[in-house]
Image (spheres, rainbow, N blue to C red):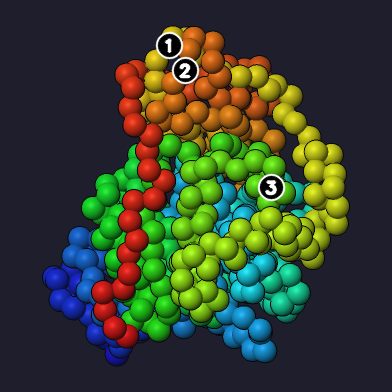
Amino acid sequence: MPLPQDIIRAKRDGQELTSESIKAFVNGIAGGQVSDAQVGAFAMAVYLQGMSRAEQTGLTLAMRDSGRSLHWTGLSGPVLDKHSTGGVGDLVSLVLAPMLAACGAYVPMISGRGLGHTGGTLDKLESIPGFNVHLASRTFEQVVREAGLAIVGQSDDLAPADGRMYAVRDVTATVDACPLIVASILSKKLAEGLGALVLDVKTGNGALICERNRARDLAQDLVDVAQLAGLRSSAVITDMNQPLASSAGNALEVLEAIAYLKNESRNPRLQEVVLALATELLLLGGLASNREQAGSMLAWALESGQAASLFARMVALQGGPVDLFERTQEYFPPAPVVRPLTAKARGYVAYIDTRAIGLCVGALGGGRRRQGEGIDHRVGLTDLCNVGDEVASGDRLATIHAADEAGWQAAAETLAGAITIGRATDPLPACYEYIAPSVNN
């Protein structure tokens, strides 16, 4: 087998790596034979030289095989999941998973925590008292089988090479290397034992990949590598030039998700993205034969209350309260200071700095500045305005939920700089385009 430095040198010089070489390197990462310095050098070589689809597939499969994989037997429906590249106010998973389960799918969703300015599904769910995102493997499987869905964190034995490589990428300026993004996402999803996957690839000023063309390239790589690895997949490129939902912040997004599932209120942009992704999955999973049928199934899942019932069942099985939907407000105490930020002049919302919005939530205490730091689940923003909205002086731009007056004032200053009032502009689309595989497996 080649030495790690030989593999690094070959990639540094632009050579295509064999599947055997990639597997040897990944096994060395998982087993500790490859040093952090070598992982960093490899990541930088990939960042500079890129990887072919064959190399990305080899890296993805090797990282999947560095740990255990889930195997589902005896289920009455397909095993489906989605993945988002991250955004602000992106609570899609909280409503999409129970909607899919209500339509007959099983959703073993392995999610992450907030990273930088983006929110994390696990942090949101942990705002529910008692909710446990660290389930034993057998318990995880039982919850999926009984409720149709479970949302948990990544265990140490699931694609462990990815965990180590990501930690090194985070400190070597290679987080946004597209081949490594592809392998990181897909290795974990393949380990879930999925039958189909849809990718929500964000683009815009609040996305990991800001430029539309680069987002399209990443989406194509993701669905093609998934296809080559034997996983049915498609992608939707969605907008992150403004927060997706009406709220941003952990408990506040859970409250919005509950209102969505209870048919009380739905942000139209959020609804468009949820239905686009869910429709793709129902088609990929064979639960619907066309988009019209998928739309009818999803409407029934919400209107019948079945999606809400399954979400509540998941919460109870994962340690949360059994009466979450009946006593919602009692389980989510408000922040001490809740007050709106208003417009100072008449005009239109012409631009929103979405990254600044996400960082504002973090500064309020709703995110982490370092790993392991605690967060305040109560804080964040609601009633967020949208690009294209007409406002008059004194109209609400957002409501700030802060731990104290100083926090409110700091957030107000940040938001005032992040929301530009100017001339009339068209509303932004929520979904830009669909990406299908361009290769055969």
Give the x, y percent position of residue 21. 29, 84
**Callout 2: few (<14), some (14-19), or many (20+) C-alpha neighbours within 10 Å?**
many
Pointer 3: what residue? 263
- Amino acid type, callout 2: Val
| Residue 314 in view of the camera | yes
Q: Earlier in the sequence, mark 3 or mark 1?
A: 3
Q: Decide: is 146 above or below 415.
A: below
Q: Position of residue 183 (x, y in %)?
A: 38, 70
Q: Residue at x 80, y 49 (%)?
A: 325
Q: Secondary structure at mark 1?
A: loop
Of mark 1 and mark 2, the one earlier in the sequence is 1
Q: Are marks 1 and 2 in contact (CB under 8 Å)?
A: yes
**Residue bearing mark 2:** 391
Task: Indicate whether 281 appears above or below 359.
Answer: below
Q: Nearer the viewer, mark 3 or mark 1?
A: 3
- Residue at image x 37%, y 38%? 428
Mark carried by residue 346: 1
Q: Position of residue 204 (x, y in %)?
A: 34, 43
Q: Whole-percent x and y of residue 437?
A: 31, 73
Q: Between residues 131 and 19, which one lies in front from this camera angle?
A: 131
Where is residue 157, by image quadrant? bottom right
Label of residue 390 in the image: none
Query: Number of labelled discs?
Result: 3
**In this rendering, position of residue 179 left or right of residue 289:** left
Q: Residue at x 78, y 35 (%)?
A: 333
Location of residue 57 by image quarter = bottom left
Q: Residues within 10 Å of mark 1 (few under 14, many from 20)?
A: some
